[in-house]
Image (tube, rainbow, N blue to C red):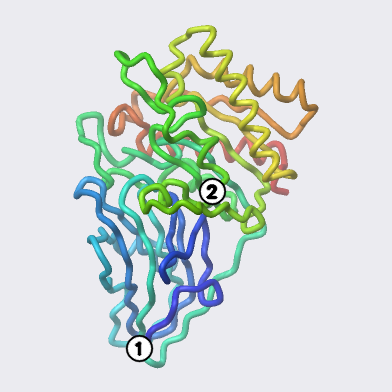
Amino acid sequence: MKLEASKDRMKVMGRYDRLDEMLYLCYSGAYVEFLFVGCYLEVEMLSDFVSNKEACIMGVYLDGKIHSRLKLNKGIHRYTLIDSTERISVKVRLIKLTEVQYATSAIHALFTDDEATIQPTKYQRRKIEFIGDSITCGYGNEGNQYGSSTTEEENAVKSYAILCAEELKADFQLISFSGIGIISRYIEPDIEEPLTDVLMPIIYPYTDWYLYKRKEIKNKHLWNFNEFIADIVVINLGSNDASYIRNQKDRENYFVEEYQKFISTVRKYQPESVIICTIGVMEGKISLVVQKAVSLYKEHTGDNKVYFFEEEAIRSEEGIGTAGHPTVRTHERMAQKLREYIQENGWLD
């Protein structure tokens, strides 16, 4: 039996889009989830598979436990999720572990035995949106400092963002992109000009700006923010901007100005949310600059629902992930600290 991937059959979490009869799961941590009763379940998916190191990897969770990881091949293919000799009842979650700038993931249809049933799981009462860079994506968190960059070492489920949201029993949505910033993407020390082709203030209003760029779609779809009205928005940006700012006062001032504008953008789309601006696990020097931006924004606007929360730097005993990024151990600590901060302030009570 062939079933279309639709919201009446499954919970769809994270930003998604429909193009060419495909349900695109856009950013890290986007997933579909449903209650399955039956013997056999396949999913038919599309991916563009940029390269072996940049393949899209999906996590298959059954009743909350990892069952398998699917490395998507280029083109449309079917992947077996369940093959049982007996009829079973199980909660299925198919979640994107890798990020938006690498190979895409789109669901075309599900295939089941004729007697199978599928029903969407329930949405949580609380919602948290995370806006960030590679740290929020979970880049390199399953690698080590000697490894090379590959999506097999990236796991959004083990990022501080999803760990924190799950601990708080909140639905989550990530808008994250490795190397991204407010005024510049990451640049090498010998480069003087900022890299501004993909910045968070540019892509945030759109469902999946990078997908549209890749597919050369001129009519980019604006995200319907009513799809996910967040109780809390966490902004974790600035680490890549620091590669350009380099303690230069004019660049710092420009960053402060643009960071304030971005908070205003988030407030426009999430008018009632608590906004937490956090930084520090990889780049400590930028923390004071972000804190200044938050303070000035609050002073200028009177918005008293915006907060600065400084992260603790990576600890040596936690190890170092790919390209100096936090390991899963560090992400677990980050999640705990952020969860405690949210609980202490009663923002999800």
Residue type, label 1 = Asp
| Residue placed most toward the observer, 10 or 4 | 4
Front one among 228 and 195? 195
Placement of 279 over or under 19, stated as above or below: above
Q: Would residue 256 be seen by someone viewing this image from the given angle?
A: yes
* Front in this rendered view, residue 53 or 92: 53
User: Can you give x and y, in whole percent of width and height, for residue 260 in the image?
Assistant: 64, 26
Above or below 55: residue 115: below
Q: Is residue 156 visible?
A: no
Q: List x then y, in percent, for residue 263.
A: 64, 32
Q: Tell which tag, 2 or 1, sits nearer the viewer.
A: 2
Q: Quadrant of residue 149?
A: top left
> For the residues marked 2 and 1, what is the alpha-carbon distance in whole angstroms?
37 Å
Q: How many marks?
A: 2
Left/right placement of residue 240 relative to residue 126 reads: left
Labels 2 & 1 near each other (Cβ < 8 A): no
Residue position for label 1? 113
Q: Secondary structure at mark 2?
A: loop
Identify the mark at residue 206; answer none if there is no mark.
Answer: 2
Give SS at disc 1.
Answer: loop
- Residue farthest right in this picture: 302
In the image, residue 25 lies at what x, y percent? Answer: 43, 59
Q: Is residue 166 above or below residue 111?
A: above
